[in-house]
Image (cartoon, rainbow, N blue to C red):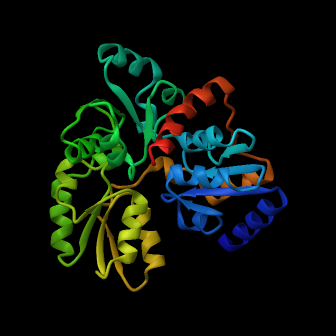
């Protein structure tokens, strides 16, 4: 049955000129029918470079918004309208505007996991892989890093000469992991390397053999001569790596690392959008799009 649904999707996306993007946290059966699989920003860049007039995002809302920001001429769909991101939604434009008034001499650095509306008042955007480089090379010495305080703490540790202010926010899925989870995993898999996303709490990241973005974790595991890995990010990454590297072993750091928003999208959702029976078109006024694009353009200018 899964293969039949996938075949229908492959046929419909060709007929309707649709490029399908799947975030790395999506289920395997969705990744298999996607044109591109990867991190949120990388997918947006890929979408901007394809000739397709339509783009279908299998991910969460801010990712589809980022595609629209970079590709306004394309019709962009979100596979499942309820797929949001708690981190992206926990800080809004009004809150950060108020914080900026309290700290007017701080440059606002926004993780890509933010809404389009919030990006409109930020100075530069960053990804997990570019955050340290961009903050280190910024002319400003005072930085307000939003929304993820764990990623921000990692950046602050790597760039100690900057004054980095953090707010209490972040990914609730990564934040729930504790050092005791690391200790348990190490006991179960003593020969495995621990690969951790910087969105995890410092007490977890400090125990890691490698800290990096989702793509960084995957590349490290693929290229490493080691054969066993504990994966400290969304549980689907361990699954994808197991398919791609069948000669190696991958263990989720904890079963708690499951994102319900990413899991909201199903293969049936993808099929239904292509049938014209579901999903949501991302609509954005030009003023918001251009204002949000400024901090992304600044990230690109800085080599992010």
Does the image show residue 294? yes
Residue furthest to the right in view is: 15
Front-lying residue, 233 or 116: 116
Looking at the image, which residue is at 37% across and 43% down?
A: 134
Q: Position of residue 78 (x, y in %)?
A: 64, 45
Q: Position of residue 293 (x, y in %)?
A: 57, 34
Does the image show residue 285? no
Image quadrant in which the N terminus is located: bottom right
Q: Taking 203 as reference, is 304 left or right? A: right
Front-lying residue, 222 or 61: 222
Front-lying residue, 149 or 83: 149
Q: Is residue 43 above or below residue 10?
A: above
Front-lying residue, 147 or 103: 103
Quarter of the view holding residue 110: top left
Looking at the image, which residue is at 55% across and 44% down?
A: 63
Q: Is residue 197 above or below residue 112?
A: below
Quarter of the view holding residue 187: bottom left
Residue furthest to the front in view is: 139
Looking at the image, which residue is at 33% across and 16% down?
A: 104
Q: Position of residue 272 (x, y in %)?
A: 73, 53
Q: Taking 203 as reference, is 259 left or right? A: right
Q: Is residue 80 above or below residue 194?
A: above
């Amino acid at each position: 049955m899964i293969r039949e649904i996938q075949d229908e999707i492959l046929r419909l996306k060709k007929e309707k000129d649709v490029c399908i993007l799947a975030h790395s946290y999506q289920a395997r059966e969705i990744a298999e029918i996607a044109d591109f699989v990867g991190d949120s920003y990388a997918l947006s860049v890929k979408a901007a470079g394809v000739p397709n007039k339509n783009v279908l995002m299998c991910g969460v809302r801010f990712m589809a918004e980022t595609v629209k920001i970079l590709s306004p001429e394309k019709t962009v769909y979100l596979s499942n309208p309820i797929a949001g991101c708690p981190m992206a939604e926990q800080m809004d434009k009004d809150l950060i505007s108020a914080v900026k008034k309290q700290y007017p001499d701080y440059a606002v650095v926004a993780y890509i996991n933010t809404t389009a509306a919030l990006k409109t008042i930020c100075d530069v955007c960053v990804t997990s892989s570019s955050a340290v480089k961009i903050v280190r090379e910024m002319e400003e010495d005072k930085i307000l890093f939003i929304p993820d305080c764990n990623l921000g703490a990692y950046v602050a540790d790597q760039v100690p000469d900057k004054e980095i202010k953090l707010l209490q926010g972040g990914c609730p899925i990564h934040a729930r992991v504790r050092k005791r989870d690391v200790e348990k995993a190490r006991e179960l898999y003593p020969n495995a390397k621990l690969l951790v996303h910087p969105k995890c709490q410092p007490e977890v990241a400090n125990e890691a053999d490698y800290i990096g973005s989702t793509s960084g974790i995957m590349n490290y595991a693929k290229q490493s001569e080691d054969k066993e890995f504990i994966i400290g990010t969304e549980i689907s990454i361990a699954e994808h790596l197991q398919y791609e590297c069948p000669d190696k072993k991958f263990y989720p750091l904890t079963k708690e690392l499951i994102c319900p928003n990413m899991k909201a999208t199903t293969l049936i959702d993808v099929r239904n959008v292509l049938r014209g029976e579901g999903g949501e078109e991302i609509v954005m006024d030009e003023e918001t799009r251009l204002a949000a694009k400024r901090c992304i353009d600044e990230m690109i200018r800085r080599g992010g």
